Amino acid sequence: MKKKIIASLPLLAMATTGAAFAQSSVQLYGNIDQAVTVVDGENTWSGLNSGGNKDSYFGLRGTEDLGNGLKAQFVLESGINADTGNGDSGSGLDFKRRATVGLLGNFGEVHLGRDETAAYKAMQRYDVFNHAGIGGTQSWGLGNNDDKRKDNLIGYVSPNFGGLTFAANYAFGEQSNSTWKTKAYYDAAVSYSQGPWSATFAAEQQNNSLLGGLDTRQRSYALGAGYDFGVVKMVGAYRQTNNQPQGMADYKDKTYTLGAAAPVGAAGVVKASYNRYERHNMASLDAQKADQFSLGYEHNLSKRTALYGTYSYLKNKDGGTMSLVADSGATLSDSGKQHAVQVGLRHSF
Amino acid sequence: MKKKIIASLPLLAMATTGAAFAQSSVQLYGNIDQAVTVVDGENTWSGLNSGGNKDSYFGLRGTEDLGNGLKAQFVLESGINADTGNGDSGSGLDFKRRATVGLLGNFGEVHLGRDETAAYKAMQRYDVFNHAGIGGTQSWGLGNNDDKRKDNLIGYVSPNFGGLTFAANYAFGEQSNSTWKTKAYYDAAVSYSQGPWSATFAAEQQNNSLLGGLDTRQRSYALGAGYDFGVVKMVGAYRQTNNQPQGMADYKDKTYTLGAAAPVGAAGVVKASYNRYERHNMASLDAQKADQFSLGYEHNLSKRTALYGTYSYLKNKDGGTMSLVADSGATLSDSGKQHAVQVGLRHSF
Amino acid sequence: MKKKIIASLPLLAMATTGAAFAQSSVQLYGNIDQAVTVVDGENTWSGLNSGGNKDSYFGLRGTEDLGNGLKAQFVLESGINADTGNGDSGSGLDFKRRATVGLLGNFGEVHLGRDETAAYKAMQRYDVFNHAGIGGTQSWGLGNNDDKRKDNLIGYVSPNFGGLTFAANYAFGEQSNSTWKTKAYYDAAVSYSQGPWSATFAAEQQNNSLLGGLDTRQRSYALGAGYDFGVVKMVGAYRQTNNQPQGMADYKDKTYTLGAAAPVGAAGVVKASYNRYERHNMASLDAQKADQFSLGYEHNLSKRTALYGTYSYLKNKDGGTMSLVADSGATLSDSGKQHAVQVGLRHSF
């Protein structure tokens, strides 16, 4: 008898879990990250920023088992400027971080809608500062072929073939009386992960971007690799955009990224990174340069919650006008230097 | 003993279900529908559209039992342009699909706020294409007395009297120093459902709409009926709007709809419909006409998820300028023809 | 055997409750309140209003136990114009009611982001009409130092010391090349609650507000006290704002509030309040006055749901131009009187 009862528990647990699932086939999730920021340089600024360690967002997602290994999945995700309560566009909420529905099976995953590009998604792991806050790389930054996300995507993600995965997207240009190529965007990324190793190669093409008044085709390439030594994880990345304006000479934009993350004690992580930017002034096509050094410490209070502090230093060269904090309101003049410190709290749910 | 254990299961299941309910008196629900669309005609277009088979939206709703057969209920529902992640107005999210609170009892239901009109709600079942996508009827379309939803409603829905139900709304015009009638909207719908039969009659009045620069009163009537033969379900509908501009002759807009839906196998549905539109040019008051033929197939992967394909053909006559896809960016010239194909995935949660 | 089974129930219930918690560490909550409103005076108006008894909103919140008495907590809260489905700014949804993440412990609570000011939060209990609807006080109203909520806050709330609590905020001004004080906001509130007694004192300072074209520093003070006699609860409050425009004479704005709330039967509450406003015309700096008398009845159908009716009368003096309903569209002329009635339904979830 005793055995019977015990045997019935898993069944019962399933039944009640099933009941709970029936009411909430939807999962609510998100991340709220706020940081006190102080910027010093040719201009000074202090304030509260959203996403010093990781972007702030919330979302709804769910998966339905359709049988025979097939699943349906949807994701709706909204960025938040958590310091003001606005959406991350600076006004209201929308689902412009992600709005997709798709099918998953042994063939991989096909989804439709707005999503991160395959290139950005695959390369994200090669910045120890999560492309966020003052320490984050600006390899996708203000400038060229820099959309991290695209509307009107058809996306494919392959199954994992012994560590190897492949992902690709086509985004409609949605132009009237034009070819399917007009304003279209394509990308593909191949990623490899095995034990301590990882590597990624990604390529993107954006047709017909208007840059400096010229119809420009943009092709970007990105390479990344990482190795986890245990005491420290090292990552390196390179991203290059070839801008091809109609009837004009081509010009290139480049970002080099090096990073290291080392666990300290049971709950701490020390992080450091170096970014080198070479971007172009539309007028002269000369490369404007900037170097960025970042150092950070992250203290995990739990798997979901962390306190962190980041220091970053950015130095412009050859007419560069980059800036550490996008929403700082501070515009550095040529050859300017900027120091910034960010101390914050991140909590995911 | 064995019996006792089994008997205790339902009680236990109730207890745990109750616990789960306590944490979530709110239900999150929605629908995400994305479709690849290709339009051919005097203008061509290709892209991704939201809501090819059914509108995309998400919502929060909940019901509280107040005892003595009385219940409180709220609904907050937000439309989504799922292809871009925007709200369905093209910018941010809002609850303009529905925002109501109400009381339910043996008297029926009374609710306050923004909601679908009783006329639109009752007539929806007479379009086999759900008023969505390229195949959907545009009986509520661009033009006259076409609001599917109204702000500032007081709504009533009757109990079901042996298949017969009645619903009515009054929407405040909210004008200063005016009568209660100024800009007000009223509607009522009577619906009957019994076995294979269904029928609806709905009437609407919108006071003081500004049409073509003239203060116009609009009265709409709609009739619908359906019969389910088992092998095929047939539906027919008619909607007419009488526009009465101040100091001008009246003019009418009409839509005729015929539809059929036939189950194919265990999971498929074939759908066909014909719409005839007769609308008015404000300048000449001549009726511009258009005919729309649609054919679709829907394959249900589950109760919540379906793949579908739709073909639709629209032909303008006598100066008509209607178009199959509202967000196609394509404007057909007089007497133009348009073909479109839509293939998509719908998933509700 | 029977005992064993019963003993296993709590364990099992915990297991399944745990499973349900795992899926929803987030709580969805909110309030929907709709009221039919009729305004009579020099201008008339009728319509549906959101928040006649309590603001309409929805939110997401969650708490994580970090061990050792430490907790992480987030809140995202969005105001709703429930009568139209818009956000409470009149357009889309955002989290401008609250967007915070913080830590709670035996030291109290520290949080970062956008929130209600400590002054407003502490003084809210001294208006029997919840600062909402036609009966609500406008001590935080159109005019001076009137932000109920601030962006970019660092907030602190003390533990409860035998009925005494303390809360304070600093809101960054976020100005480039300025001192930390530029456009900054500070406030603090001390509150006491013991048995039937409660009392609050709050002080606020807003640097560099632009009022009537002049750079103005605003300092507000608020005092409130309440005593619950059992048959009736009495409250009184006073709020004063000192406006100090650069190079101009100071001027003051004042609000006096008196209120009473008496339980009637098991489910009813009768409420009455008087507000006296003394505000300033920027041009003449003469005090414009208004008196507001409000009477209301609230019938609780449950803890979460109530029907209510409110009558309010407002009389302007000495050039005052205040109005009972902000979104009425009615502008009273000098010395005007306004009567209004509001009947509505409130439901929280």
Image (cartoon, coloured by chain):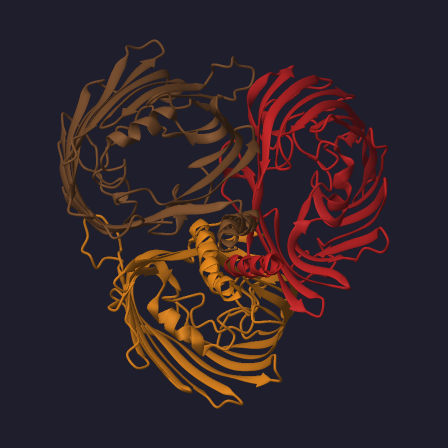
Chain colours: A brown, B red, C orange
As displayed, is residue A204 above or below residue B49? Answer: above
Say which of C194 and C176 sits in front.
C194
User: How far across and how far down the image is residue A24, in percent?
Assistant: 53, 48
Say which of C85 and B31 sits in front.
B31
Q: Residue at 44% across / 40% down in the picture?
A: A77
Say which of A4 and A266 sits in front.
A4
User: How far across and how far down the image is residue C7, in percent?
Assistant: 47, 65
Q: Residue at 17% across / 43% down in the picture?
A: A296
Please tell me in which quadrant of the rendered image residue A55 appears. top left
Figure disc tally: 0
Q: Is C283 on the left or on the right of A199, as rendered?
A: right
User: How far across and how far down the image is residue A266, in percent?
Assistant: 19, 48
Say which of C188 and B269 sits in front.
B269
Q: Is B106 on the left or on the right of A272, as rendered?
A: right
Residue B50 seen from this side? yes
As displayed, is residue C342 above or below residue B300? Answer: below
